[in-house]
Amino acid sequence: MSRAPNARLREVAAAFVRHMHAFAREVKLTEEEFELGVDFLNRIGQSTHDAHNEGVLFSDAIGFSTLVCLLNNGQNGATETASALLGPFWRMHSPATENGGSIVRSETPGPALFANCRIADPDGNPLADVEVDIWQASPVGLYENQDPGQADMNLRGKFRTDAEGRIWFRSVKPAGYPVPTDGPVGDLLRAQLRHPYRPAHLHFLCYKPGYKTLITQVFVDDDQHLESDVVFGVTRHLIGDFQQGVGAAPAPGVDGPWFRLTYDFVMEAGEAKLPTPPIR
């Protein structure tokens, strides 16, 4: 590694090789196991395409994505953090939507959800003009890029906070869902006798120049898989208070039960940069 001109590359690559060699010695890796591992790695690449990223899913399923998130937020893991893993389903160009608008873009069954969110700095001052990207799976457990029955960009929207740091929108209450199991990650989960379920959640990506981009999720508080999330993404701070509404909903045309979510986010000063989209 000594001839690599990039100092950080030398550090990371040397440590990677050192730990890979130590891993092989620790488990006394056989040649057959080595071949199986290389085949597993190849299958991850072969299973990745424009609408699905098996590499991100594998990193999520072994807790690596969450570890990297915790190491880079919340004072290097020393404190609770509002950050969470990006996941494999974020798309860059979700539709701009006015506050009060709906991200339901095709027929989507499920209880209506009315969300009110506020974004502030660490001192509690509201942050105006924050770009807030929101996406979620449908109540049948599929993101729109996985489901030909949903309109393009269904349950996706991009909002901007007002002068009080607030956004508000309408959606449907999310439901838990299994991660894709038709590839090598599914084989791994079955071999480990693990369930493939994620607890119900909404994704948020908050972007404003001068502030560290906040990537997070808000989980439904009564989901049965909060303590066994297949990608290890739940912390106490990320569990929202989804309250069932009483009386008439705050919008016309709502039949049956409806829910309200109120949640506050905090953004810290730092570099504003967007992640690389895992799918197109």
Image (tube, rainbow, N blue to C red):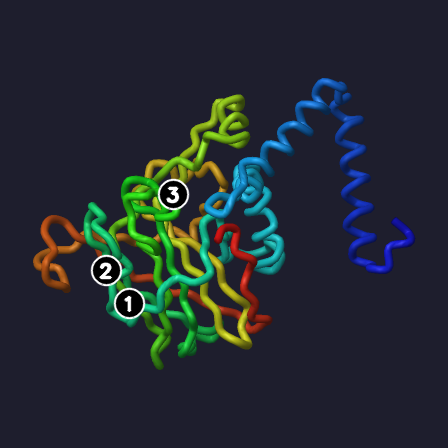
Q: Amino acid at mark 1?
A: Trp
Q: Are marks 2 and 3 in contact (CB under 8 Å)?
A: no
Where does residue 65 sit, x and y in percent of width and height?
57, 46
Q: Amino acid at mark 3?
A: Gln
Residue on which the image places disc 2: 114
Residue on which the image places disc 3: 146
| Residue nearest the observer in this picture, 252 or 81 | 252
Residue at point 62%, 29% (across, down): 40
Residue on which the image places disc 1: 168
Q: Residue at the bottom extreme?
A: 163
Q: Are marks 1 and 2 in contact (CB under 8 Å)?
A: yes
Q: Residue at the right extreme?
A: 3
Where does residue 264 sit, x and y in percent of width and height?
37, 65
In what element is the residue under mark 2?
Answer: strand
In what element is the residue under mark 1?
Answer: strand
Number of labels in the image equals 3
Q: Amino acid at mark 2?
A: Phe
